[in-house]
C-alpha cells in the first residue's frame, strides 16, 4: 500500500493518532513551560535571598568594624568556595577587595539589582590540596545576579551570585522534556503503526470483501479473525445479513421460476384454445365453448395471481390490517361446516375434535379461515382416492402456550422427507399435484398465513397420509386472562 | 336503473357502460373523482359504481364526501386492491359493497341488483314466499306446499338469503359473504355443494324447480 499524505489523512487511525500526538505535545509543552517558569522563579528567589543574606552579614561586619572590617570579611569570603561574588570599590570604581576581577564600565554607577556576565575568581569546592586551590574557572564571564550598594563613604559594595547553576538545571529540565516528548511521539507512531494500521488493514479487508460481494459474488463473506472483538461482531452481523440476502435472493429466483411455470402453462392453454377456435369452420356452439373455457381458465389464472400476491404481501410482513382476538374454535367450526358437504360428496369422512382451554389467537379471521380451508381442501382431495375409508380429521389442542391445529388425512401423503421439504418451499407444486385442480398454492398460502400470525406449519408423515400441523402462539389477551375468552 | 360509473380507465368505463346498458340500465360515466362527485351530488342516481383509485379525488374521499352531505345512494366500490383490510376500509368509508378487479360482469350485475333492491326495500318481512315455498323468520321454519322442510341452521340462512333476493341472481361470493360472513376464496366451489343440498331438500318430491342455476353467474330462486 502506498501512502501519500492526503490519502493517509483520510484514514481514521492516522487522524486519531495525529490528534492524540498533538494533544500530548500541547500538554507536555504546557507542563514544561510551567515547570521551567516555576523553577526559574524559585531559583531566582533563592539567589536573591542568598545575596540579601550576604549583604546583611556584611552590613553587620561594617557596623562592627567599619570599612576595614568589611574589607576583611569580603576578602575572607571571596576565598571561600562557592558561587558568590564580592566586590568593594572606591568612588572611582577601583577594586579594593573581592573576587571580581574586572567590571564592565558603568556597572557600579547604578544602585540595585543587575544581571550580566561577570568575570570572577572562583575557588574550587574541594580543597584537598594546595594545588587544587586556585582559579578553577577564572576569567570567563559568567552570568550572575548582583546587588550594588553605595556605602556612606562613597565606597561601593557588590554582592552577587553566579547564575550558572540555575541555567544548568534549566537545561537539564529542557533536555528531560525533549526526551520525554521524543519518546511520546515515538510511542504515538508505534501505537498508530501497530494498532491503527492493524485496524485499518482489517477495515480494508472488509471493504475489499464488500466490493467483491457488491460485484455480484453473493457467496462471499467478510473475514472474521476469531478474536471476538468489535470488528468480528460487525463482520459476523454483516455475514448473517448477507446470508439472509442470499436466501431471499435464491428464494426470489426460485419463486420467479415457479411462478413462470404456473402461469405460463395456463396462458399457453388459453392461447391455443383461442387459436383453435379461430381455425377451421367452427359453429357458434364451438365459439361459445371456447370462450367459456377461456373465461374459466382466466378465472383460474386470476386466482393464482391473487394467491401469489397475497403470499408475497404476507411474507413481506406488510400488514395494515388490525389484529383481532380470534377464537380458533369458531374458525374450525365454520370451515368444517363449510366443507362437510364437499367431503361427504367426495366420500370422505370429515371429523373434528376440540380440546380444552383458551384457543384465542391475535389474528385475522379471513386469513385464518382461508388457511384452514386450503388445508382441509387439500386433505379432502388427496384422501378421496385412499384405499382405506377416506378420512380427514381436524384437531384443535392447547399445548402450553401454543395452540395446535392439526389436519390429518389418510391419503397417499408425501412419504419422502425431501418432497415434504420441497412442498414447504414457496410456490412449489409437487409434480404429482399438478394434475389436481386449484392454484396449487394452497399450502404455500396457508404457510404464509400461519407465519404471518407468528406460528409454524409443519408437514408430518402418517402411515398412510399426511398431517399438517399448525402451531399458533396464544393471543396476548389469552395469556393474561386465560379462560376469559369468549366461547 | 340510473347508474353513475366513476372510473378513470376509459376502456373499463366503456366496457362497464356497454354491459350495464345491455342489462337495461341508464348509465353515465365520469373520468375523475371531482367530476364524479359533482355529478353524483346533483344527479338522482340509483347506484354509484366508484373506482378506488381516481385522478383528482380518491374514490373513498368521493364516497365520504357524499355521505357527509347526506347522500345515501348505494355505492359499489371497484378496486384492484383486494386485501382483506382494503375491503374493510372501503366499506368503512361508506361503500355498500366491494368488488375486486378483475370481476365477472355477472357478479357486478348481480350485486347492483341486490344493492338497489336493498335500498328500495321496505320493512324487512317476517315471512318470505316464493311460489309454494314459505319461510318464517320468526319461528325459523320453512314449508313447501304446507309441508315442513327440515333445515340445518346454515341451510336456513342460505334459503333466507335466497328468498329475500328471490328473482335476483346471487353469486357464490355473495352467498359466502352474506351467509357465512367470509370473503376469502375457497379453492373448491363449496357453495355449489351447499346449494345442491338445499335444492334437494326443497325440491325433492316436487315437480316445479325453484332454485335455478345461472351459468357463469350464480343462482336464482324463483317460482317460474
Image: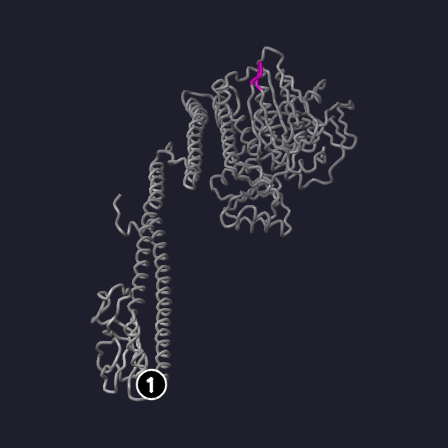
Q: Count residues near mark 1 (Cα–Cα under 10 Å), then give few for <14, some for 14-19, many for 20+.
A: few
Which is more toward the observer, A53 or A9?
A: A53
Majority secondary structure in the magenta region: strand
Residue at the location (79% across, 30% down)? Answer: B139
Question: Is B217 in the magenta?
Answer: no
Q: Is residue B116 left or right of residue A118?
A: right
**Quadrant (top left, top right, bottom left, bottom right) of the N terminus of chain A:** top left
Q: Chain of mark 1?
A: A
Answer above or below: position of A416 versus A164. above
Q: Position of residue A55 (x, y in %)?
A: 35, 78
Q: Position of residue A427 (x, y in %)?
A: 48, 27
Residue at the location (43% across, 40% down)? Answer: A229
Answer above or below: position of A103 versus A463. below
Which is more toward the observer, A38 or A331?
A: A38
Q: Quadrant of residue A194?
A: top left
Which is more toward the observer, A32 or A43?
A: A43
Which stretch is magenta?
A461-466
**Quadrant (top left, top right, bottom left, bottom right) of the C terminus of chain A:** top right
Q: Position of residue A218 (x, y in %)?
A: 38, 33
Q: Single out the residue that lies furthest toward the front.
A: A130
Q: Position of residue A424 (x, y in %)?
A: 51, 25
Q: Which residue is mark 1?
A: A66
Tell me if I can see residue A307 in this picture.
Answer: yes
Q: Quadrant of residue B213?
A: top right
Question: Is A462 in the magenta?
Answer: yes
Q: Single out the residue that lies furthest toward the bottom.
A: A153
Amino acid at each position: 500500500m502506498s501512502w501519500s499524505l492526503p490519502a493517509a489523512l483520510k484514514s481514521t487511525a492516522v487522524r486519531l493518532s495525529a490528534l492524540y500526538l498533538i494533544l500530548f505535545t500541547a500538554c507536555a509543552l504546557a507542563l514544561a513551560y510551567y515547570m521551567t517558569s516555576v523553577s526559574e522563579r524559585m531559583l531566582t528567589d533563592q539567589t536573591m535571598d542568598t545575596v540579601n543574606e550576604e549583604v546583611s552579614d556584611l552590613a553587620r561586619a561594617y557596623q562592627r568594624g567599619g570599612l576595614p572590617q568589611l574589607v576583611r570579611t569580603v576578602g575572607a569570603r571571596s576565598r571561600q568556595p562557592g558561587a558568590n561574588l564580592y566586590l568593594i570599590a572606591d568612588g572611582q570604581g577601583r577594586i579594593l577587595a573581592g573576587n571580581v576581577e574586572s567590571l564592565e564600565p558603568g556597572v557600579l554607577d547604578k544602585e540595585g539589582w543587575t544581571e550580566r556576565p561577570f568575570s570572577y575568581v572562583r575557588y574550587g569546592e574541594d580543597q584537598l590540596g594546595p594545588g587544587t586551590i586556585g582559579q578553577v574557572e577564572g576569567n570567563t564571564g559568567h552570568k550572575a545576579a548582583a546587588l550594588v550598594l553605595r556605602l556612606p563613604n562613597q565606597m561601593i559594595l557588590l554582592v552577587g551570585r553566579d547564575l550558572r547553576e540555575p541555567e544548568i538545571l534549566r537545561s537539564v529540565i529542557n533536555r528531560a522534556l525533549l526526551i520525554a516528548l521524543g519518546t511520546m511521539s515515538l510511542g504515538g507512531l508505534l501505537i498508530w503503526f501497530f494498532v491503527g494500521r492493524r485496524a485499518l488493514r482489517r477495515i480494508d479487508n472488509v471493504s475489499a470483501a464488500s466490493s467483491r460481494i457488491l460485484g455480484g459474488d453473493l457467496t462471499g463473506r467478510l473475514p472474521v479473525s476469531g478474536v471476538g472483538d468489535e470488528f468480528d461482531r460487525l463482520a459476523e452481523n454483516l455475514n448473517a445479513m448477507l446470508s439472509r440476502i442470499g436466501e431471499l435472493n435464491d428464494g426470489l429466483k426460485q419463486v420467479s421460476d415457479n411462478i413462470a411455470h404456473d402461469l405460463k402453462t395456463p396462458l399457453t392453454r388459453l392461447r391455443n384454445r383461442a387459436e383453435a377456435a379461430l381455425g377451421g369452420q367452427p359453429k357458434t356452439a364451438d365459439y361459445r365453448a371456447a370462450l367459456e373455457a377461456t373465461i374459466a381458465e382466466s378465472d383460474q389464472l386470476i386466482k393464482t395471481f391473487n394467491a401469489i400476491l397475497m403470499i408475497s404481501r404476507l411474507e413481506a410482513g406488510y400488514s395494515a390490517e388490525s389484529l383481532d382476538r380470534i377464537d380458533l374454535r369458531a374458525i374450525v367450526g365454520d370451515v368444517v361446516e363449510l366443507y362437510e358437504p364437499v367431503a361427504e360428496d367426495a366420500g370422505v369422512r370429515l371429523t373434528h375434535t376440540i380440546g380444552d382451554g383458551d384457543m384465542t389467537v391475535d389474528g385475522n379471521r379471513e386469513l385464518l379461515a382461508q388457511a384452514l380451508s386450503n388445508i382441509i381442501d387439500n386433505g379432502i382431495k388427496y384422501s378421496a382416492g385412499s384405499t382405506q375409508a377416506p378420512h380427514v380429521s381436524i384437531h384443535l389442542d392447547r399445548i402450553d402456550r401454543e395452540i395446535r391445529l392439526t389436519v390429518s388425512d389418510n391419503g397417499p401423503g408425501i412419504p419422502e422427507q425431501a418432497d415434504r421439504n420441497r412442498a414447504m418451499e414457496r410456490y412449489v407444486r409437487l409434480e404429482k399435484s399438478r394434475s389436481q385442480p386449484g392454484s396449487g398454492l394452497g399450502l404455500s398460502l396457508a404457510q404464509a398465513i400461519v407465519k404471518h400470525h407468528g406460528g409454524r406449519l409443519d408437514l408430518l408423515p402418517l402411515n398412510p397420509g399426511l398431517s399438517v400441523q399448525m402451531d399458533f402462539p396464544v393471543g396476548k389477551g389469552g395469556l393474561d386472562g386465560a379462560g376469559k375468552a369468549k366461547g | 336503473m340510473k347508474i353513475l360509473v366513476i372510473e378513470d380507465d376509459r376502456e373499463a368505463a366503456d366496457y362497464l357502460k356497454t354491459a350495464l346498458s345491455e342489462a337495461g340500465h341508464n348509465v353515465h360515466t365520469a373520468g375523475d373523482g371531482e367530476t364524479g362527485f359533482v355529478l353524483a351530488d346533483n344527479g338522482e342516481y340509483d347506484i354509484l359504481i366508484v373506482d378506488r383509485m381516481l385522478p383528482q379525488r380518491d374514490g373513498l374521499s368521493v364516497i365520504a364526501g357524499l355521505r357527509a352531505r347526506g347522500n345515501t345512494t348505494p355505492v359499489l366500490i371497484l378496486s384492484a386492491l383486494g386485501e382483506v383490510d382494503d375491503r374493510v376500509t372501503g366499506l368503512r368509508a361508506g361503500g355498500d359493497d366491494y368488488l375486486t378487479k378483475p370481476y365477472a360482469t355477472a357478479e357486478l350485475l348481480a350485486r347492483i341488483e341486490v344493492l338497489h333492491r336493498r335500498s328500495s326495500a321496505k320493512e324487512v318481512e317476517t315471512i318470505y314466499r316464493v311460489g309454494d315455498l314459505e319461510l318464517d323468520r320468526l319461528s325459523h321454519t320453512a314449508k313447501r306446499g304446507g309441508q315442513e322442510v327440515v333445515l340445518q341452521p346454515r341451510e336456513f340462512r342460505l334459503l333466507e338469503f335466497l328468498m329475500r333476493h328471490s328473482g335476483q341472481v346471487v353469486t357464490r361470493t355473495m352467498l359466502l359473504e352474506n351467509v357465512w360472513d367470509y370473503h376469502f376464496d375457497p379453492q373448491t366451489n363449496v357453495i355449489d355443494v351447499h346449494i345442491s343440498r338445499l335444492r334437494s331438500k326443497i325440491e325433492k318430491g316436487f315437480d316445479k324447480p325453484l332454485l335455478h342455476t345461472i351459468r357463469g353467474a350464480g343462482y336464482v330462486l324463483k317460482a317460474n
